[in-house]
Image (spheres, rainbow, N blue to C red):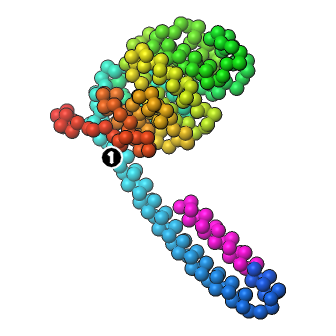
Amino acid sequence: MIDLKYHITSLIAVFLALGVGILIGSTIVGGNVLVDQQKKMIDRLEEQFYVLKEREKDLVEENKYKNQIISNYENYSQAVLPLLVKNRLAGYRIAVVVSGDRDIPAGMLNALSIAGAEVISKTVVLSNMELKDDGLREKLADYYDLDDDVKNDTLRSYIASSVGAVIANEADITAIDMLQGDELVKFAGVENEIVDGVILLGGSNDLNRFFVRSFDQALIDYLVSRNIKVFGVENSEVNYSYMEHYQKSNISTIDNVDMSPGQISLIFTIEGEAGNYGVKPTAQKFMPSLPVDNILER
């Protein structure tokens, strides 16, 4: 679609240029040879132009049809989701951490609820994690007993460990106050609850909020060292994907958690079907294998 529009625009520009050329050529040469050649060229270009216009019209209709099919499949997936995931995670306690700049998909929370999982806490990384303020940097360096010229990525790694300690119920109140008071993260949920797993929601549309190599990596390392399972997820459309980086940490990933198939994949992955699922090049499979016999028995 974009290439066709560009091509059509280019043809229009050529038409205008040829029109000017005919005017100038007829004035300078005074004969009909150059004019006839340019008219023939315009005729050929007009023919290409109309062919491309028809092709664009066909592509628009084709895209509308395919989008309708995708919408139908999504509706179908939403309809069968409760049957597939109901009570599969009964009693499972989940913490959600939003490290990218995307909101938590409502469908993901709904799928976890239907599966019987309890989301006991939510942690959101805030814009101050960019560490643009020198005063904040100095305060953090002092808190973690680091040199004043410490790199931002190193500071974020220390902050991530503190966040991990909060999630694992290993942090003292000063760490929580510091993290929230300086608007680095926002915590919400039940304190002093044992966590069975953490869903790490990444993916960013803003490169300034791309902290996966520092914050996310350190958080994953901390939680895994405490035997807490981490599941890396993101929406199907983001400018900067975290999937490749998450997979280097050997955690399961779902790259389309905003869609029903991704939400089903998440439930089965938490249940034990480890892997990398979704629609992006980093995915190994679209979805985990579904135990059909077991589903029918339910």
Can you give x and y, in whole percent of width and height, for residue 30 in the image? 80, 91
Measured as percent of width and height from the top left, residue 121 is found at 46, 20
Question: Residue at horizontal 47%, vertical 36%?
Answer: 244
Residue 149 at least partly seen: yes
Image position of 236 with respect to 275: above or below:
below
- Is residue 115 visible to the viewer in this orientation of the structure? no
The residue at which mark 1 appears reads as: 76
Residue 176 x, y percent position in the rendering: 56, 12
| Quadrant in the rendering for residue 19 | bottom right
Task: Please state the total of marks drawn on the protein image.
Answer: 1
Position of residue 57 measured from the top left corner of the image (x, y, whole percent): 50, 68
* Residue at 47%, 20% in the rendered image: 221
Main SS category, magenta section = helix
Magenta span of residues: 1-20
When the figure is inspected, residue 78 is found, relative to residue 9, above or below; the finding is: above
Q: Is residue 74 left or right of residue 155?
A: left
Whether 294 is among the magenta residues is no
Q: Amino acid at mark 1?
A: Tyr
Q: Which residue is pictured at 67% across the width and 10% down the height?
A: 142
Secondary structure at badge 1 equals helix
Pick the residue in front: 167 or 85: 167
Q: Nearer the viewer, residue 146 or 66?
A: 146
**Are there few (<14), some (14-19), or many (20+) residues within 10 Å of tag 1?**
few
Where is residue 195, by image quadrant?
top left
Which quadrant would residue 12 be assigned to in this image?
bottom right
